[in-house]
Image (spheres, rainbow, N blue to C red):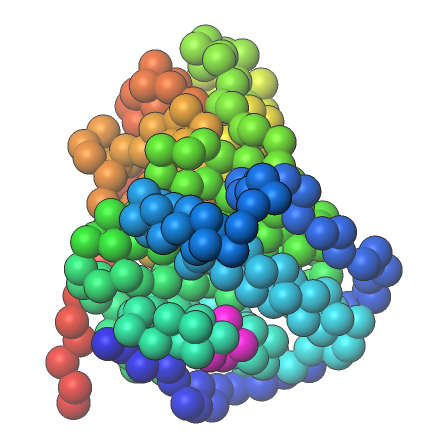
Amino acid sequence: MQGVASTFPSVSRCQIERPSFKCSAPTPDQGINRLKLPPTSLQTVTQHNKTNKMSDPWKESFDHAVAVARKAGVVIRDALQNEVKVMTKSSSVDLVTQTDQRVEKIIISSVKEKFPTHSFIGEESVAAGHPCILTDDPTWIIDPVDGTTNFVHGFPFVAVSIGFAVNKELEFGVVYSCIEDKMYTGRKGKGAFCDGEKLEVSDVKDIRKSMIISELGSNRDEETVSKIFSTMKKILCIPVHGLRGSGTAATNMCLVASGAVEAFFEIGIHCWDVAAGAVIVTEAGGLLLDVDGGPWDLMSRRMMSANNKTIADRLIKEIDVFPAERDDVVKSKK
Ligand SMILES: O=P([O-])([O-])O[C@@H]1[C@H](O)[C@H](O)[C@@H](O)[C@H](O)[C@H]1O
Ligand SMILES: [Mg+2]
C-alpha cells in the first residue's frame, strides 16, 4: 500500500494578498443516495446491512468520501480568508500552498483510519515523491485543491476531487465545488447527482450550437502554448457558441455532466484532476475519449469528455496534440 507523505517538499515562497470571501455555512447533503430503512428489529437491520454490503460493497467508502470532501471544503473556505503562502512545484506557474498539503493529509488520514487496507494516489504525495501507480487495490485518487491557482488569486472556483478505483476501474467520484457549495457525485451504474439532483448531459449534437470548456494549463513552453492557442482558434472559428475555462478540470467535467457545456478537453491534466469527474460525466450519459479519438486512459494526461460522440469527434479533428509524460512513468532515483 502506498503511504501518506509525512512531509511535503519545501519550495520557493512568495506572498500574495487576495480579496477575502464571505461564505455561507455548508448545507447538509440532500438525498445523496440515502438508504431508507423501515422501522424494524435490530436483527433484520443487521441482515439488511450485510446484504447491502455484498450488493453495494463501496457504499461505505462513497459515504465517507462525501463527508471528508465536505470537511476538506470547509478547511479550504476558511483558508481563503487568510493570506496564502505560495510555493512552486515543477515550474514557477505550478503553484502549491500549505492548504493543498494540509487538506490532502486530512483526507488521507481520515480514510486510512476507516479503511486501513486501501491505497492512495494524492497530488501532493506524488509531488513529495510517492509513486503514481494504479494497482488492483481499492485506491483513492485525490486532488485536495483542484484549482490551486484560482485559490491563490481568489478566483471563485475551487474543488476537492476524490475518485475511487478498484481493480483499476473507477467505482465512484466526488467533486465538492467548495466556494459554490455544490456537491457533485457519481457512482458506477447508479447515476450522477449534484446536491441530490440527477445530472444529465446536454443533447446538443450540432457543434455550432455548443459551448466548450478547456484550459490553458501550466506548461509555458512556447511550442506547446502555440498548439493550445491554434486548437482554441480553430474551435472558436468552427464557430462554437463559446469557449470557457473555470480553472479546475474537476469542475469543468461537472459542467459537462450538468449540461452547461457540451465538452471539456485538455492535454496535461493529471489522474487526480479527472478521476472523479470521469465517473460523474459517464454516469450523466457522457463519454470519455483520448484526444486522438482512441479509448481514454486515466494515466495518459489526456482527456476529451463530451455529451456525445458527434461533438467529441468534431472537436478531436481540431486538436493539435502535444506530448505530456504519463502519470505512471516510474522515475529512476538519482
Ligand atoms: O493543479 P491543480 O489546480 O490541482 O489542477 C489544475 C487544474 O485542474 C487546471 O484547471 C488544469 O488546467 C490543470 O491541468 C490542473 O493541473
Ligand atoms: Mg488539480
Camera sees residue 30: yes
Instruction: Assign the magenta stretch its main secondary structure.
Output: helix
Query: Position of 258 compared to 279: left or right?
Result: right
Q: Does residue 251 appear in this view?
A: no
In front of the other: 273 or 333: 273
Left or right: 224 in relation to 43 = left
Which quarter shows the N terminus?
bottom left
Query: Residue placed at 51% from the left, 24% from the top?
Result: 200
Answer left or right for 150 relative to 95: right
Residue 88 on the magenta segment = no
Question: Which residue is rendered at x = 48% and y = 13% of the image?
Answer: 203
- Residue 37: x %, y % from top left: 56, 42
Q: Which residues are magenta?
A: 105-109
Q: Position of residue 97 (x, y in %)?
A: 58, 77
Relative to 54, residue 124 above or below: below
Q: Quadrant of the C terminus?
A: bottom left
Residue 259 in picture, x, y percent from top left = 55, 24
237 versus 219 height, above or below? above
Q: Nearer the viewer, residue 142 or 315?
A: 142
